[in-house]
Structures are given as structure tokens and as C-alpha cells.
Image (spheres, rainbow, N blue to C red):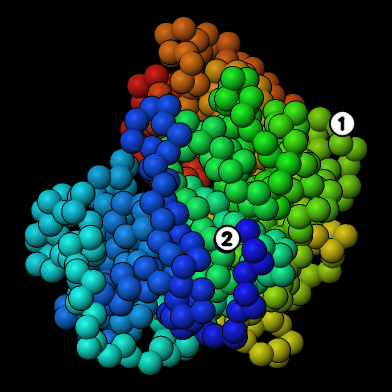
Amino acid sequence: MDSRRPPLAPAYRTLPEYVRHWAETTPDRRAFTFVEHPVSGSRGVHRTLTWRRLEVRVRALAARLAQEAGPGERVALLCPQGTDYITGFLAALTAGLVAVPLYPPGLPGHGDRLVAVLADARPAAVLTTSRVLAEVTDFCERAEVPVVAADQVPDATAQDWPAPEPDPEATAYLQYTSGSTRTPAGVEITHANVVANAHQALSAYAADTHPVTCVGWLPLYHDMGLVLSVAAPVARGLLSVLMDPAAFLHEPARWLRLLTAHPRAVSAAPNFAYDYCASAVTDAQKADLRLAGITALINGSEPVRPGTADRFHAAFAAQGLDADVHCPSYGLAEATVFVSAARPGEPLARFALDRDALATGKALPARPDDPRAVLLAGCGTPAGQRVRIVDPVSRAALPEGEVGEIWVRGPNVGRGYWNNEPQSRRVFGAALAGGTPDGWLRTGDLGTVLDGQLIVTGRLKDLIVVDGRNHYPQDVEATVQDTHPAVRRDRLAAFGVPGEAGERVVVVAEHARTTSLAEIDVPGLERAVRSAVSSRHGLRLADVVLVAPGTVPRTSSGKVARALTRTRYLEGAYAAGTAR
């Protein structure tokens, strides 16, 4: 029954309205399927909610949460990935509360962030599941906040409960930023924001007029996972099939099997995941894969590298993968998530840019085979919103081919930062020079436009400035990881530190899991890295540090946390095992 074209969706402005609509019009249609992998090698246990069953659970949880929190108060979601997370999120919105998508306290490496976010959000209640109830209750004991287990709430709880009328302009949830450049901050996303962004994404990936299935493993506390796996399917009445991120990391072929099982799939992953699949999926695992039916594979990393798309396609071309389904995209939590996207069915837009010109703020073409060229992928065109490239100092809009800060304006841009009005005015209330209306979002990202394509070049705060020249850390990192096989891909950070004669450049890199530090010729690796960086970037590295896998910190969205790596380096955390 689910292969039929979904019915036309009405123009609602809140997700609870859509849930109620689909429950009334297509009650027996599948809404969400969570695939569990209880043991290694498991093909998965599928647990499915129909639209009718989804609404029953959402109403029951909404009524229960309304007993603990009043309108506009926060409810923190400390649930494992699964259908209870989805029903809990939608229940908070249905009850007129503000959801705070988070994760259980056992997530490795993110305990301190969870403490900081809960202290900032000050939730009136916490929602979790029986599986982690004891752990979450113990974690929240000092805060003296009530903890509700979603799967222990009976359906009858909603009996005679009057759901409040949804307000599109009210805050629906706080999306905490990943913390890649600063302390995590909660972006206030309204009901209208998330519905607008869901429709923008559906339109960009050809999912607004054709039947698709959303397939994902991204965590639901992450902006892209939440919008693509929950908001977009609800807004369009589509089936969403998802799995746990840990299940993907343990066996990446599981994701590809779900893509095989659900033709016309739309899915998203960061850049590293495509490289990971290309290197880790075995020939035996490939034998059962049929990837010809995929509609779009979204790559939303910083930056999107054409080489990754090429390696992924080469690895799975024999399984029918079409090269034109790879869709580089750009977004950020402050804009709900999606800003611009390459459209499926179009060839990957490739740009070879002169590195020296890029350092001066100009995007000039270079030969792709020039060793000093920077190879980047275009992130398509804006999805239902306006984008400008702006001089961050003068606030003047820049012409095509010049590098500046990316500014965004649209119905998907959040209200501001929770409990931080000064920062909200600075980031969400920017005005272009010349007296134009304010209300532009300053993204803090650098980019340019060429041939109508948005190209993201890096983070404004991550720029390394040496002798007056700009260097992009991800560009230096790409050189380092391509220099020696012992350097673990996408698990390294380049950054500047103060020195007597100006900024000095340091690289901290994890070594590959397939080898140990004792087996590596560290002085030889250091010489190779220094030589490559000097030749390609004209930079002298002050320090090269090789560390164990898992040592370089990452944000909650999986990006390398350069600022935190820099702090730890300056504190002497990487003193052992360094190469100098």
C-alpha cells in the first residue's frame, strides 16, 4: 500500500496539524519504521508505527507531559534513537511545550556538553525510555526535574485531554548548535520555521511531487537528522525508515541495505560516511546491494569534497549507483538546517580554485591538475530563501567570484538564541550596507558564488592568518591526510596558536586504526607532512602531533572541534606522542 503516491498535503504551518491530518486521511499507512540491529550480522528487526498509531502515542505523551510542564516550558528529550524519540518530540510540540532534542547521558564524549545544555535550557521535565530510565534519573537527580519514560505512558492517558491550538509563531524546539566554534547555544526554531524548512528540503530533493522514502541513520538530536527523518516525512506524509548511528558505524553496509530495500530513497550523511562506506564495505556485502533506485544522497559536510563523491561512486557503480544522485548541500542550525542544495539528476558541480587567490578573497579558476589548486564542490542554489555573500566588516554585498561571509534570509531562519538577546541581535538581525532592511542571518561561514552555485570555503572563526594571508584549516587538513596513509581521514585538526613572531600553525592528527603508533615511522611522517604543507600552502608547521584514534574531539554532529583541539593542545593534553 505504501508504494502509492502519497496524497496531496494541505498547507498547515505546524507539525501536529500534519500528524492529525495523516491519521485521519491515511490511518493505516506506514509513518515511521525503526530498524534495530540487536547482534552483529543482523539484517535488522523492524518496528513500525502507522499514522493512526503515531497519533495515539503522540496524544498520550502530550497529555502526560502537560501534567509536568506548562505552555512554553522546555522538555528535554534524553531518549535513545527510535520511535519513542519521534513520538516524544511530536508530543512536546502537540502539548504547546518546547522540545529540547538531546541524547542519553551515556553518549561517549558528550557528557560535559549535556550538563551545559541542560543548565542552559532549564527543562521542566525530561523524557526518556525504560531502557535508560535508571541512568537518566540518576543523571537528573541534582536538578530535581521529573523524568517520564515514554514507553510506560498508557494510550488512555489522552482520554478527554484537550490539545491546545497550535501557534505557528511559537517556539517549537531549541536546536542546540554542535559547538564546533563556541559553547553550544540553543536556537529557537518556531513551528513555522521547521515546516517551512521541511518543504524547502522536499522541494530541493524532488520529494515534493514524487513518492520517496526518507532513509537515515543521523542522530535525531542533530538538525539534519531531525528535519530529514521527522519533519519532512510528517509534512509530506512520507515513510521514514531510520536506524541507530552506532549501528551504521559498526557496519556501514546496513545503511546501504536499507537504501536497497526502499527504492526512491532520500538520505543524508556527512562527508566522512561516504569515504567510510567506500573503504569498509566488503565485496561480499556489496553482492546483495541494488542502488539504482536512489533519488538523492545528501552530503552536508564542511566542506564537501568532489573526491569523496568520486570514491563513493567508484566503489558502488557496479551496484547500479548513479553518479548524479550525490547532492552537496549547505545548512546550519540557525536556519533550521537546509539553506542550499545541488539537485538530484544534475552532474556534480566541480570547482578548481587558485589557492593563492583564495587566500586574498578571490575565487579564481585553476587547472584541476595543478597541485596548488583547491578542489571544491558546489552546494547548488538556495532552497526557498535568499543568500548573499557579504564583506563581514563593511557589510557590503559582494559580486560573484569574491569570498565573504554567507548571509541568509528566509522563513526557515530561527527566532534567535535562547536566553541570549545580545548575541541574537548580532547574528539574526544583521543589515546590509546601504540601509536595506535588517533580519539577515550571519552564518559565520565563508563562501562565494560561481556559475550560480554556492561554494562554501570555510569558517570565519577557523581562518588561520599567517603574514597577512588567509589559510583554510580544512584545506591544510586535506593535504596532511593525503600525504601519509597512517593519518586517519577526517580525524585531524589544523589551527593557529600565538607565537612571538605571529601566528604559528599546528596540526593534531589521529593515526589510522589499522596501525599502532609504535609501528609508524613518526619522524618520517612528520617530514612528509611538513614538506607537503610547505610546498602546497607555503606554510611552515610549528608542530605536528600524532595521537591515538578517538583523541581528536568532535562536535555532536561529528565535525572535528578545532577550537577545543586547540585549547587542549595549549593546555598540554597532547604532550605525549608528539612529533617535533
The Cα–Cα distance between marks 1 and 2, rounded to whole angstroms, is 48 Å
User: Tag 2's secondary structure?
Assistant: loop
**Would residue 55 be found to the left or right of residue 529 on screen?**
left
Which quadrant of the figure has residue 11?
A: bottom right
Report the label total: 2
Q: Where residue 483 sits: x, y (%)?
A: 66, 22
Q: Amino acid at mark 2?
A: Asp
Residue at 51% in and 70% down: 234
Query: Image height check: is 364 above or below 531?
Result: below
Q: Nearer the viewer, residue 321 or 211?
A: 211
Residue at 19% in and 69% down: 154
User: Tag 1's secondary structure?
Assistant: loop
Residue at 26% in and 52% down: 104
Q: Residue 369 — which label?
A: 1
**Would residue 559 be found to the left or right of residue 454 on screen?**
left
Query: Image height check: is 98 above or below 566?
Result: below
Q: Amino acid at mark 1?
A: Asp
Q: Nearer the viewer, mark 1 or mark 2?
A: 2
Q: Characterize the local packing of mark 1: few (<14), some (14-19) or many (20 or more) Cα atoms within 10 angstroms.
A: few
Residue at 58% in and 71% down: 236
Q: Where does the N terminus fall, quadrant-wise?
A: bottom right
Q: Residue 2 — which label?
A: 2
Which quadrant of the figure has residue 307?
A: top right
Query: Image height check: is 320 above or below 376?
Result: above
